[in-house]
Amino acid sequence: MSLAILCRRAFFDLRQNFFGQLITTMVVSLSILIFAFFSLLYFNLQDFVDRFGTELGLTIFLTKEAPKDRIPYLYQKLTDLSEVEKVTYISSEEAFRRLEHFLKEEQDVLEGVDAEFLPPSFEVQINRAVFQLDRIKQLAGEIDKWPEVSKVQFGQEWIDRLHVFSGLVRTIVTIIGILLLFTAAFVVTNTIKLNVYARKEELEIMRLVGATNMFIQGPFLVEAFLQGLLGSSLALGIVFAGYSFLQGFETRFELLRGMNICFIPWHYTFAIIASSVLLCVMGTALAMRRFLRL
Amino acid sequence: MISLELSIIRFKDVFKKYSPENVIFSGIDLEIEKGEFVFLTGPSGIGKSTMLRILFCAERPTSGEIWVDGVALSSLSNAQVPYLRRKIGVIFQDFKLLSNRTIFDNVALSLEVIGLGKKQAEQRVMQVLEGVGLKGKMSQYPLRLSGGEQQRVAIARAVVNRPAIILADEPTGNLDLQRTEEVMMLMEELNARGATIIFATHDERLFENTHRRVLRFHNGKIRI
């Protein structure tokens, strides 16, 4: 059977059983919609946790004895690290100026104090793309061993809390995600099964007139492919519309500004569509199996 | 395995049982010649339909061998069964038509399955529908037709790909006397054109005055 005949038969069947096909596509769409909204929530939470971690950054304090001519070398050494996004050198004078600014009216307490009493430092911003909590901890330990470095500060307590929090959230989200995925798979395969059962007479008659299993199954599989593709695309389209709507809010309202809502990563989006198609095709093939025996 | 016999259908020591208490056939030996028209009779539930179902491979016998058009059914794999079914036209009491397809599409289904070209298929369907007197109703749906007309559509579907064998399972069971006569005439016509027909019925009136062979089921055996 050629592809053209197969598609012609599939579209003929789609027209003939339009209502059943529509219901199945809607069920696929709703199931994927719930899962996709949940994924959107998950990725935004993940993004928030990652961003929060990188914004903490590292502060590297140098010893007072560190020779000034070593500063450019250290700057370059830090910049060359793959985990580092940006390095800013804060001289003792700059640090003193910041302290004065911080103390405002009470800066008199600094009177007679030499700017050199504050150590020079580097402020290091972490690269978001390679951010990993354990690696940052390890990096801080390595830099701390450099002879010119007196101390490395990176908000250890905050990062540890964040680590525990993100781990917990990830576990909860993964469990709920798996449950949702199973629910979606169950609902979709059962709807498909009902749809196939509703057409069992048609299958029986086709077998009776000598149709091969491929001839019978072919259009059903094409229909299942379309149901999976259309259902999941529709669901993701709705989620994208919701995301765009929220982005509009983000630019209009001060409170939401800086939230940086992100969409589900594209490769994940394609994985959802591919899984949905696979689920529908496999569900149909399994539902038809008992009708294709002798 | 190829049989060298001239008979188109041959049963050799065929048993069929669903359980030790439920034995349908116990050692059936039977030969039906090419072009023969035989009646298969006996009370309801005796095994007439089972015999037909075994012939088009919807069921397998428990033991024994059956040859259809020279082919031993036990040698057929599941994938080969559809090709055997294309040689056999089957007609049922309940017509088994697709209610969401037109009369034309119902009949054309048999040709679509064998991959016949659209034009050729169209010609063949028209010809057969004309033969059963339904050419004018080809774009109607089955439920709009009378029982007799629906059975004629079922007959058209069964014969449109010119099968060598026609199995009719109580095809007149749901029809009044006049429609029954119409169906019988059609069957006679098909037989006259060379088709071998096995006609299962419990209605003895249909073969009262016939010269045809009548096969009677009795205690799992066939009496002629």
Image (cartoon, coloured by chain):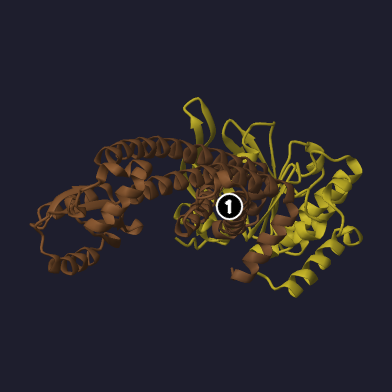
Chain colours: A brown, B yellow
> Looking at the image, can residue B159 be seen?
yes
**Which image quarter is the N terminus of chain A in?**
bottom right
Q: Residue at x 32, y 49 (%)?
A: A100
Q: Residue at x 39, y 50 (%)?
A: A51
- Relative image position of residue A201 (x, y in whole percent): 67, 45
Relative to B112, A36 lies left or right: left
For label 1, the crowd category at 10 Å Cα-Cα, with few meaning under 14, some 14 to 19 and many 20 or more, is many
- Relative image position of residue B163 (x, y in whole percent): 67, 62
**Which residue is labeled 1 in the image?**
A236
Q: Quadrant of residue B25?
A: top right
- Relative image position of residue A142 (x, y in whole percent): 13, 54
> Looking at the image, can residue B163 be seen?
no
Image height of A238 relative to B41, above or below: below
Q: Chain of mark 1?
A: A
Q: Nearer the viewer, residue A205 or A122?
A: A122
Q: Nearer the viewer, residue B6 or B140?
A: B140
Outermost residue, top side: B21
Image height of B170 relative to B78, above or below: above
Kind of residue at disc 1: Leu
- Relative image position of residue B102 (x, y in whole percent): 81, 56
Which secondary structure lies at badge 1?
A: helix
